[in-house]
Image: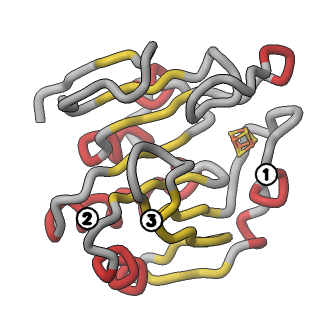
Amino acid sequence: MMKISVLDIVHQTMADGPGFRTAIYCAGCDHACPGCHNPQSWNINNGHWMEIDELMEIIKADSMSNVTFTGGDPFCQVDAFTELARRIKAETTKNIWCWTGYTIEEIQADEHLSQMLPYIDTLVDGPFILAQRDTTLLFRGSPNQRIIHLTPVEEDVCPGAVELVKPR
Ligand code: SF4
């Protein structure tokens, strides 16, 4: 049974993507960005292990919220997060936003990491760069980070987002 190391689950947040969202803050991140907002998330052992079924119950229980994967870096637990994302897409109509310290180019170039991309609607990519910190940016800490729509969106809620619409 696959499990995810979870630091926290925030219900009905409006800070982790557009609208109400169930945000899963995972433990585990290898990027070690100086100035990271959440350094306690780096160690995967700082989280508690939750089964995919348990997470699905929590996600499904909130009919009005979409889903966010953040942390930490969900791609550091890519096998289990891919299974969670696959089940969200199979069993709900919710969209998924995912934050990562990898760039999309790094993910696309890696067969193991890229397995999750087909299930993600919007990827916020790239490491946080302290020297470029900008608190006015929506959903990002530094301007190198991009909001990349992998599926079509009705309205670009994030000016400056990069749209890469990929066939499913
Ligand atoms: S990718 Fe995010 S969580 Fe990981 S070190 Fe960088 S800012 Fe922190």
Compared across the picture, whether 14 is left or right of 114 comes to right
- Quadrant location of the N terminus? bottom left
Mark 1 is on which residue type? Asn
- Circle nearer the N terminus (1, 2): 1
Tell which tag, 2 or 3, sits nearer the viewer: 3
Residue at position x 35%, y 66% from top? 84
Q: Position of residue 155 (x, y in %)?
A: 24, 27
- Say which mark, if any, is on residue 22: 3
Compared across the picture, whether 36 is left or right of 150 comes to right
Residue linked to disc 2:
88
Q: Secondary structure at mark 3?
A: strand
Task: Please say if 128 is above or below 28.
Answer: above
Mark 3 is on which residue type? Thr
- Residue 54 sits in quarter: bottom left
Compared across the picture, whether 15 is left or right of 2 comes to right
Task: Please say if 108 is above or below 11.
Answer: above
